[in-house]
Amino acid sequence: MSGMETSGKPMDTSAIGGCAPDAAICARGIVRDFESGQTTIRVLHGIDTDIKPGEMTYVVGESGSGKTTLISIMCGILWPTEGEVKVFGTDIYSLSDTELVNFRLNNIGFIFQQYNLIPSIDAAANAAVPLIAQGMDIHEAREKAKVLLEKLNIADQADKLPSQLSGGQQQRVAIARALVHEPRLVVCDEPTAALDANSGRRVMDLLREVAVAEDRACIIVTHDNRIFDLADRILVLEDGEVTHDGTEMPDDH
Amino acid sequence: MLWIAIRMLTGDAQKFYGLLFGIAFSTLLITQQLTIFVNLIERGASGVYNAPEAEIWVMDPVSRTTDVNYAMPSTALDEVRSVPGVEWAVPHLRAAASVRTSAGDLEGVAIIGVDDATLIGLPERLLEGDKSILSRPDSVIIDDGGVVNLFENGEEPIGQRLELNDQRAVIRGIADSIPSFTSQVTLYTKYSQALNFVPGTRNRLTFVLAGVSEGLSAEDVAARIEQQTGLKAETRQEFADAGVSFIVENTGIPTNFGITVVLGFVVGVAIVGLTFSLFIRDNIKQFGALKAIGVTNAKIVSMVGAQAALVGTVGYALGVIGTVVFIYAFSGNPFFKGFYIPWQIPLISLVSVIIILAMTGFIALRSVLNTEPAAVFR
């Protein structure tokens, strides 16, 4: 990461493998190639970074900079070509497929750009999906999800189908789904991209309120400059490399 | 997760009903066509089933079925009676004749002459009249299907006079019988009377019906008859099977029905395959999200399996119910008289439905399993 700008308090990386003992995510030497016909395109060029718990970390960059690829690798849904990723101390790509899936189910919450709510089940059931997947009884899971929906100020929409909710409300249901099973890592992909400025701001305020905790890390991929001020830390990616790591956006962006 | 899977499916009403329709239609077509086929070819054995007392049918060696026969000399009756193990033997005549109806129409009929003394060879039950009426001059008993064919205007058949091969015949009873393969009008009369109705040839005894002495098997006695008389003797079941086989081997019916059944299967695969694939494609993002969240491939398989099972169970039930309703609705039609659904047919339909769903489910599932969870971020 030569030439990378840094600011803020540096992490203690004296632990084995250079990972900070308290790091939520420790990524080392992450390389990712994609095949396109006869051509191999390198999207990530050996990224080393640590994500701290208790912080809202933004990964920003132009389209094609590799930010989505990076968080996909960090949360265990895309294998790196090279490198290793430890999430709360677990080398996730040394796990078997089933172990990795179970690790995600128990430790990671996802918020997608297009929400990806199931259209034929109501908001409470959508929010309860991770708990149901963990094997919890549907009614119990729904009740637990409703508590979270209440925190997100949409308890009165719990029985409505996604199609009956506004974009902001749907994203709040998606946030509830990402947090209902109390994961230690929350990964958000462009959470405000489909929302207007006001809704996006409200959603991010709420997300910050419910997702950021002492023992939880929250990574957000975004290029929405309206919400940059809510970040605790910003990683800027350019052409598959981290070019900035600080608490604020660099002036030239 | 199965609850979610079912809700995903039923929530998309258009595709859910499309899938149900595909399975139900396929089941209906397969079950209904196989039912008609089986019942139709069983009509090849109706002549045997309509003479329930006969344990052995004895005939000229070239005779093949009740309708495809070659008459024997009348001495054959005594020869059969002389075989040890034959409890009784009676003559049985089957011939074709023409009838001029009271309306002036011409109708081909089958004449069945039953033993004068015992009336063995008559169907077990009469809908109208009594078996004893055959002792009255010129009496005939008509089969119930024949009533519909011969008296289309709803006239009362009892007492009707028919011109039968230039002879006078009077209908005095209606038999409850299984229609023949061709649904031809059948007239039952005494053997001696039948000889008058049909044109005279030297040999007119078409079959000898025989009973077996107690403690002996029909197969053993039939073999003994063949050995001793040189005639062909078949047990009731063997002769019934021969009637069915004759139709299978000598008509295009199995091919025609087979094509329809295959079409039913193909249509099922096409409709269900297309709809299922569309359903999966429409929900691929949701499935991808579930995979990202941490739902294992095994659970995804069980979800799609539950969706297929629901569609299969309901669609199959609708198809079978449709067939039952069809058979019931047409039970008044003589062509469908006595139609039933052998248990093997719903089983065949069930296997077909399982194959359809397994094929289409597998194809649809492949796209889900091949979806990378990371795709939800793109």
Image (tube, coloured by chain):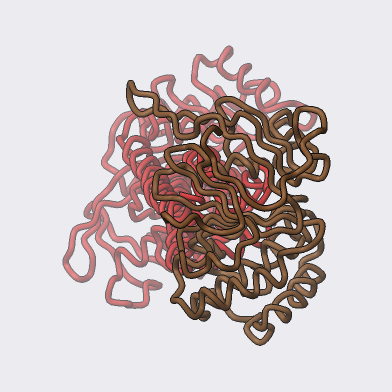
Where residue B181 appears, as percent x and y from the top left, is 38, 46
Q: Residue at x 21, y 61 (%)?
A: B100
A103 relative position to B283: left or right: right
Question: Would residue B312 be found to the left or right of residue B75 on screen?
Answer: right
Q: Is residue B279 above or below residue B85?
A: below
Position of B180 relative to B235 (above/below)? below
Which residue is located at x 79 percent, y 43 percent?
Answer: A88
Viewer-proximal residue among A176 and B303: A176
Chain letter, red in picture = B
In the picture, measured across the screen, residue B15 lies left or right of residue A89, that is left
Q: Nearer the viewer, residue B367 or B178?
A: B367
Q: Can you give x and y, in whole percent of width and height, for residue B364 in the image?
A: 48, 44
Q: Quadrant of the N terminus of chain B?
A: bottom right
Which tint is chain A?
A: brown
Residue A126 is situated, as x and y percent measured from the top left of the image, at: 64, 67
Which sits in the foreground, A181 or B82?
A: A181
Horizontal and vertical percent for residue A108? 71, 52
Is residue A221 visible in the rendered image? The answer is yes
How many numbered tags mark residues here?
A: 0
Residue B179 seen anywhere in this rendered image of the structure: no
Rendered residue at 63%/54% (across/down):
A219
* Outermost residue toward the bottom in this view: A156
